[in-house]
Amino acid sequence: MYQEWTRDFRGCKADCEEAISHLREGTLSEWYGEKEQHIIHLATSMLSSGQGPDEAHQIIDTRTNLMIPSELVTMNRLGNETRRATHMATRKYEINFVTERVSQVVIDVQETQKWTNSWETLGIFFRNPETRVAAGKLFQKMFLRKFSEQNPKMPLCYELPEGRDGPHPESRSANAAVMPWNGLRQQPKLEWISVGTDTDGSLYAKKELQEVITAVIAETSRFYPSIRFLIPCAQNWASWDAAIVVGKSWGRIFTNKTIDIVFLQLTVDPKHNILAKGLNQVRDAIPEGRFDIQYHYVIVLLTDADGTDGLKIPVWRPVLSNSKDRKKDDSWGKDKLKEYVMFVPRTALCKE
């Protein structure tokens, strides 16, 4: 239990001493529950008023001007090499939620009702690969719910234009893309993709992905497309929050099969980088066979309003081997990966 507490809440020295005392007395489980309720209290205050309760020590988040209870976050100092842009010159630190568990507690509180500061808080999740998982889980739930409803409630996708940003998504110049799931009114089967290795040393993820693709191919028929919804089980495992795999038959006697794999990545940044690592992990697991594979990447862009004022379709961008030196991965060229944007208002994730 002590290990769970240190993993979930990573308290200060005083907390550690108090936890050890409760461990000796056999009351650590009750104390853990009290700590969780305390985190919920802090999160509720922050979301409703933009600051923690008066008795709590707080840190200002310089991006949102929220006063964040220090028990919820960690403060990362930024060196000179990090502060490249002019707007970052005066920001000497960045706030992140302290652990994945704390971020999940905040998300759970957000889901209970519409809060004044939900949008500002959402942005904090995306600053850290560990804590953004909580926001990714919200997106998975939303997408599955929308998927069962289909048109017109499924958010539209727009292919990214080359060279420059595109038009407003609701203008006459914007054309919604035809996605592999269009017209399919069946719920996809859920598949969880693991991390780690099996007893024989092989990757669980590779085996599971191969089994998913094999099952989709086997199930696809003239009258029955096969659909899977993939969820990576570990934080930032594949640099995507979810993926849709759709199998369809076509041709004169419907013996030809196409497998569409659609990666979905939630972000608040229109300039979001597409990284090759997660794409490669899936591509490397594809079994050999007589079928066509089509890859798609959807940037699910959260907007800070219910409307779409000021939005525009962002420009196409190359897939990067890594985000530091921005080296391009030419194996994912324009003919190998179609890129789209899907605009999702924050109220789709944060309860009305």
Image (spheres, helix red, strand yellow):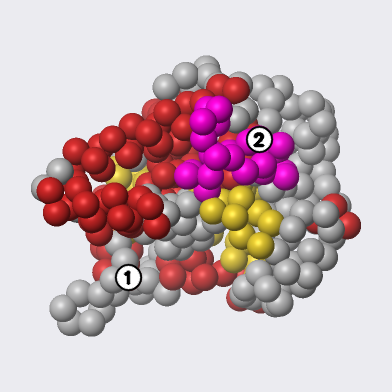
Q: Is residue 174 left or right of residue 225?
A: right
Tell me the SS state at disc 1. Answer: helix
Residue 200 vertical placement versus 136 (above, below):
below
Q: Report the number of numbered marks.
A: 2
Q: Please give the name of the residue rendered at 62% of the width and 28% of the height, measured from the top-left corner.
A: 50
Q: Nearer the viewer, residue 55 or 74?
A: 55
Give the image location of residue 327, x and y in percent. 70, 77
Specify the principal SS of the magenta part.
loop
Give the image location of residue 187, x and y in percent. 33, 34
Tell me the magenta residue range: 52-73
Q: Is residue 265 visible?
A: no
The mark lying in front, picked from 2 and 1, is 2
Q: Residues within 10 Å of mark 1 (few under 14, many from 20)?
A: many
Q: Sequence-wise, which precedes: disc 2 or disc 1?
A: 2
Q: Amino acid at mark 2?
A: Leu
Q: Are marks 2 and 1 in contact (CB under 8 Å)?
A: no
C-alpha span from label 2 to label 1: 42 Å
Q: Nearer the viewer, residue 163 or 259?
A: 163
Q: Amino acid at mark 1?
A: Lys
**Residue 117 falls inside the magenta stretch:** no
Residue 66, label in figure: 2
Q: Please give the name of the residue rendered at 25% of the width and 59% of the height, measured from the top-left corner.
A: 3
Give the image location of residue 172, x and y in percent. 81, 28
Tell me the SS state at disc 2. Answer: loop
Q: Is residue 333 left or right of residue 24?
A: right
Give the image location of residue 1, x and y in percent. 19, 53
Judging by the rendered image, the residue that carries numbered circle 1 is 206
User: Seen from this angle, which residue lies furthest left?
Assistant: 26
